[in-house]
């Protein structure tokens, strides 16, 4: 009986670990940008350039393959739990893994849209003169603003995904060690998970204030605070 419980514990825990690794791999990526100058007609280089097209295609294959594997793993885990304890026997870690699956799906789509919808553009890699002359009604302006907004949303969703998986693993250990002396340590883990998640989320949302400066084009939002330019490059 103890052997079966141990095997089941390892089986369930392997789902948490695999999902955590997959979530850690899939990050919002930056793609080759469109033209940096408004002095030439806007060309969606992320679609016309063969190298950029190959990069985008490779990313789509990788990102959605990892998402598919993760969803299969979470689905298998959920199926095993349903057949062993039923829906009424679900614990917090079971629901947290389903939440993580949803967050992973959203995060992957946001990462995909950075290149597919917004051509890899954001509010960075522009001179002050280019910022001043860029027409707020132009297509490039719209792409840069939406690209920057998507990056902020992607960072926030990615953080939520990883910390949800951490909470699921900690919850699983809480269930696994019921009646043992490890529960205080696990509760300490919950406190650390929550506080670090809040700290990281606040660093994303409050690192550039007010929030709309994260997608501001002109004046240069990074003249005093480079963090206001997305994609972690110079403004």
Image: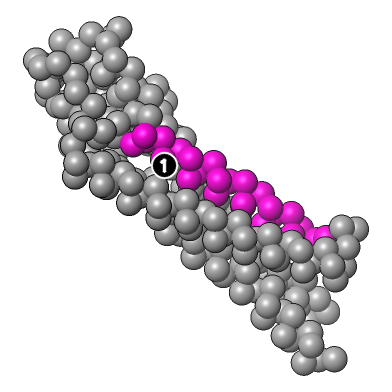
* Label 1 sits on residue: 111
Residue 172 forms part of the magenta stretch: no
Along the line of sight, the residue nearer the viewer: 20 or 77:
77
Secondary structure mostly seen in magenta is helix
Crowd band around label 1 with a 10 angstrom C-alpha radius: few (<14), some (14–19), many (20+): many
Q: Which portion, as a residue range, is magenta?
A: 89-116
The secondary structure type at the circle numbered 1 is helix
Q: Looking at the picture, does residue 90 appear above or below residue 145?
A: below
Q: Furthest residue to the right?
A: 88
Along the line of sight, the residue nearer the viewer: 86 or 221:
86
Q: Residue at the location (56% across, 70% down)?
A: 17
Q: Looking at the picture, does residue 111 appear above or below residue 9?
A: above
Residue 90 forms part of the magenta stretch: yes
Along the line of sight, the residue nearer the viewer: 115 or 145:
115
| x, y percent for residue 79 | 76, 63
| x, y percent for residue 125 | 17, 31
- Residue 74 horizontal side relative to residue 160, left or right: right
């Amino acid at each position: 009986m103890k052997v079966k419980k141990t095997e089941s514990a390892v089986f369930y825990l392997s789902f948490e670990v695999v999902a955590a690794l997959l979530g850690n791999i899939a990050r919002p990526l930056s793609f080759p940008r469109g033209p940096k100058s408004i002095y030439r007609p806007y060309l969606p280089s992320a679609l016309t350039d063969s190298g950029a097209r190959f990069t985008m295609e490779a990313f789509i294959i990788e990102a959605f393959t990892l998402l598919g594997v993760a969803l299969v793993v979470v689905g298998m885990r959920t199926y095993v739990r349903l057949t062993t304890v039923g829906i009424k026997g679900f614990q917090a870690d079971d629901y947290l893994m389903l939440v993580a699956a949803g967050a992973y799906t959203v995060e992957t789509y946001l990462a995909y849209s950075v290149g597919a919808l917004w051509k890899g553009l954001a509010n960075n890699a522009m001179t002050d003169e280019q910022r001043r002359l860029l027409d707020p009604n132009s297509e490039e302006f719209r792409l840069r603003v939406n690209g920057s907004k998507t990056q902020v949303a992607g960072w926030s969703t990615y953080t939520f995904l990883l910390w949800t998986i951490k909470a699921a693993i900690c919850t699983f250990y809480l269930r696994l060690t019921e009646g043992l002396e490890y529960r205080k340590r696990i509760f300490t883990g919950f406190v650390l998970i929550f506080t670090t998640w809040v700290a990281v989320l606040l660093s994303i949302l409050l690192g550039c204030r007010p929030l709309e400066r994260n997608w501001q084009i002109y004046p240069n939002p990074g003249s005093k605070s480079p963090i206001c330019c997305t994609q972690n490059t110079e403004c």
